[in-house]
Amino acid sequence: MIFKRFFKPGPQTIARKHHSISRKDISENALKVLYRLNASGYKAYIVGGGVRDLLLNRRPKDYDIATDAHPEEIRDVFRNSRIIGRRFKLVHVFFPDEIIEVSTFRANVIEKFDKHPDLEDQDETPIMLQADNTYGTMEEDAWRRDFTVNALYYGTEDFALSDYTGGMQDLKKKSIRMIGDPLQRYHEDPVRLLRAIRLAAKLNFSIEAKTKGPLLKLAHLLQHVPKARLFDELLKLFFEGYSLAVYEKLKNYGYFKALFPHLDSLFNEKRWKKLIELALKASDARFAEGKSLNPAFLLAIFLWPLVQKLLNDQKHSKTPFFHRLNHAMAQALDLQCETIAIPRRFTATMQAIWVAQYHLERRRKSRIIRIMEQRYFRAAFDFLSLRADAGEPLREMANWWQKIQVVNTAQQDKMIRDLVN
């Protein structure tokens, strides 16, 4: 139960008895930050996804705090902190097992407008904001946030909720609604397009009609987002436990093609479609079990169909196979990195997993043990198993590799001797 009575739109103070948040469900570190800021004479509130998730009986991934204290003042209160950021300064307060992010209330700013050639019937269209360093009040801060469900404030002075934008009503309706004019807000920061989709997938909410309308037309704005920032958003989309739901919504809204322009048509093939879906389900299952996720593995799955296509394009070449494979891998990565900057530590792992597929398939007697000792053997084996599950004729081979991992040395030697190459 999110709340117990009806609230009219506009600023609302929701007393403790009318909401479900309890201090026992909040991080002790977040409470320490709130109490110390209050004791130092400042107002401070938990805001954003932490409040939203608590109201939905979910466990927050992290806690963000908003305050009227300026960054330098926050830094003076907490010796275990550091000021970060250039576009807008934030303070990270460090604890042994957690980082609490503290921001100063932001003010409304005068928006800039300009003609935009890709939109019809728009006399004035906002352009991306390049600076955002004006401090303000809590109410101004609320109206500067992206979605109403992320603009709820919880304080420890009276344990009440403050709702300026109708976020409580939208939580009840299970609706993602942009604060302000959606067209303008998307142009201010195109990453909000992906956030709307991610939030809808994560919470299983619908996107409100006025918020959805422009979203369906603006995928091209992602071209203006720095490639490194898109990679950061990619991690939030696919590595927080709801990747299959995100994938389906990205496809439906036309954003998967914007993020992976060379893959969208390939994924319509039955064999690749099943491989992707199985990998996403496996990733979500690992997250639910508290297991680690390596972005390189899922990205290797995503780009595997492209590697195969590029490799097939060279099938008539007389160049040795592994030379052609290396060329196809490099080309696939170059094409993808034109849109999203994948760090080298991940591309190296992806290439290792891809190369290992061919060593696993060949099962050369002299290389079996060496392959099993390689750093990415387990990831490569899991990759092979998913390919088998997706319908490639690799089930016997995957079972063989599964067995040789669990038998003793003598049995391993016998399995290798019995191989018929």
Image: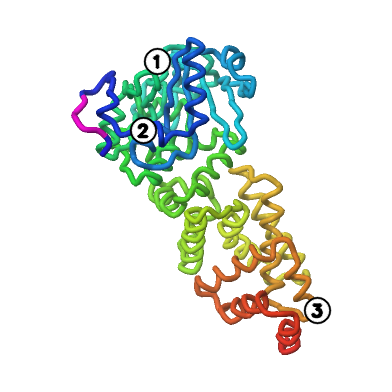
Q: Tell me the element at label 3.
A: helix
Q: From the viewer's side, name the closer residue of 53 and 200.
A: 53
**Depicted 157 relative to depicted 238: above or below:** above
Badge 2 crowding class, 10 Å Cα cut-off, few under 14, some 14 to 19, many 20 or more, is few
Mark positioned earlier in the residue sequence (3 or 1): 1
Residue drawn at (34%, 19%) of the image: 158
Going by the numbered disc 1, the residue's amino acid type is Glu
Mark positioned earlier in the residue sequence (3 or 2): 2
| Residue 5 is a magenta residue | yes
Residue at the spot of label 3: 366
Magenta stretch, residue numbers: 3-7
Question: Foreground mark, 3 or 2?
Answer: 2
- Location of the N terminus by quadrant is top left
Residue at the spot of label 1: 140
Q: Is residue 320 left or right of residue 139?
A: right
Q: Tell me the element at label 2.
A: loop
Residue drawn at (64%, 24%) of the image: 80
Residue 141 at what x, y percent from top left?
Answer: 42, 18
Residue at the spot of label 2: 22
Q: Quadrant of residue 92?
A: top right
**Depicted 134 relative to depicted 200: above or below:** above
**Depicted 253 relative to depicted 79: above or below:** below
**Depicted 362 relative to depicted 55: above or below:** below
Going by the numbered disc 3, the residue's amino acid type is Ser
Q: Residue furthest right?
A: 366
Going by the numbered disc 2, the residue's amino acid type is Ser
Q: Is residue 219 left or right of residue 366?
A: left
Question: Foreground mark, 1 or 2?
Answer: 2
Mark positioned earlier in the residue sequence (1 or 2): 2
Q: Tell me the element at label 1.
A: helix
